[in-house]
Amino acid sequence: MKKLISIGIAIALAPSIAGAGALEEVIVTAQKRSQSINDVGLSVSAATGDQISDAGITDTGDLIKVSPGLVFTASQNGTPLFSLRGVGFNDYTLGASPAVSVYVDEVPLAYGAFTKGATLDLERVEVLKGPQGLLFGQNSTGGAINYIAAKPTQELEAGAKLSYGSFNRIDTEAHVSGPLSENVAGRVAFATTQADEWQESVGSNRELGKEDLFKGRAQLQFDVSERTTILAGVNGWNDKSDTQAAQLQGLQLQYSSPSEPLVSDTVETQNRIDAFFVQPNAKNNARSAEWDEDRDLSRDDSFHNSLYG
């Protein structure tokens, strides 16, 4: 068993202007306009970019650290499933519309599989609990998660983070922002995750679970006049990580009614049950799993979108 290690380094080239211990007022756009979170008549959990970084949030599933009532489940094919206050849609197919919608700068990410790059270089995140169909559309019966990306600045600033963890996991993130001309500012941010395999086959010496993820964002802000600003940007990510294999913990049959036939083909069903029982059990070892030798669990997923406003 490899020893668990976690080391983190953060560098900021722009000094903080907030006083130590000062309470920061959180401004949210939960109702499509800027308001203090204390003036919003909704149940909202909000966290600033610094709070997100301090909590070690690198993925949408990590928001459970700052938002009570949010539940995240990783499905068998890597599609994230979200529920708020027990309301969600337990369908792990890639094309299933969620019941908890996710947005980046109010642009919807239609499916849960699109959300991998949403946590990059944020100003804040807002988790709205309860039905949000009036403002956020029909796929938000459980609630909505709205990410607000950090915007270009009129002063030069930059920052970087580096962390090292178990299985040679290396997380890096960096950004640079500043003026390009008198009326134009830009911001570029990227993050990468690299890690070795961590899952072990119960029946052989095979390993699975490597991580290879890249996230990036670039933005340009044009100050057309004192009252008009145009923001254009592009976001994207590429994921060449392994899909996590399932663990066999046991088999339990569910009966609908003693008077009703259980299945139409009892012989075939029994054959499938017997096939499960001959498989090795993962027991209480979180690293143990099993998968077919001829099954390719690697992936090469990518996503990008552009926005302006």
Image (tube, rainbow, N blue to C red):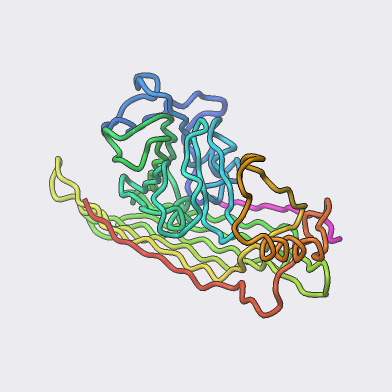
**Is residue 162 on the magenta stretch?**
no
> Where 147 sits versus 158, above or below?
above
Q: Nearer the viewer, residue 302 or 162?
A: 302
- Between 150 and 281, the residue placed more toward the observer is 281
- At 67% from the left and 60% from the top, the residue drawn is 266
- Left or right, residue 7 beside residue 162: right
Q: Closer to the camera, 31 or 200?
A: 200
Query: Residue drawn 51% across and 73% down?
Result: 300
**Residue pictured at 33% horizontal, 62% vertical:** 305
Q: Is residue 131 above or below residue 287?
A: above
Q: Is 9 one of the magenta-colored residues?
A: yes
Looking at the image, the residue that sits furthest to the right is 1
Left or right of 284 on screen, residue 181: left
| Above or below, comparing residue 289 to residue 147 in the picture | below
The front one of 122 and 226 is 122
**What residue is drawn where x is 24% and y is 53%?**
231
Seen as rendered, the residue at the extreme front is: 259
Give the total of numbered labels: 0
Q: Position of residue 163 (x, y in %)?
A: 66, 56
**Residue 256: x and y, percent?**
61, 41
Q: Tell me which segment is drawn in magenta.
A: 1-11
Find residue 14 and report its horizontal and vertical position in percent: 47, 47
| Displayed quadrant of residue 100 | top left
Among all residues in the image, which is located at the extreme bottom?
A: 294
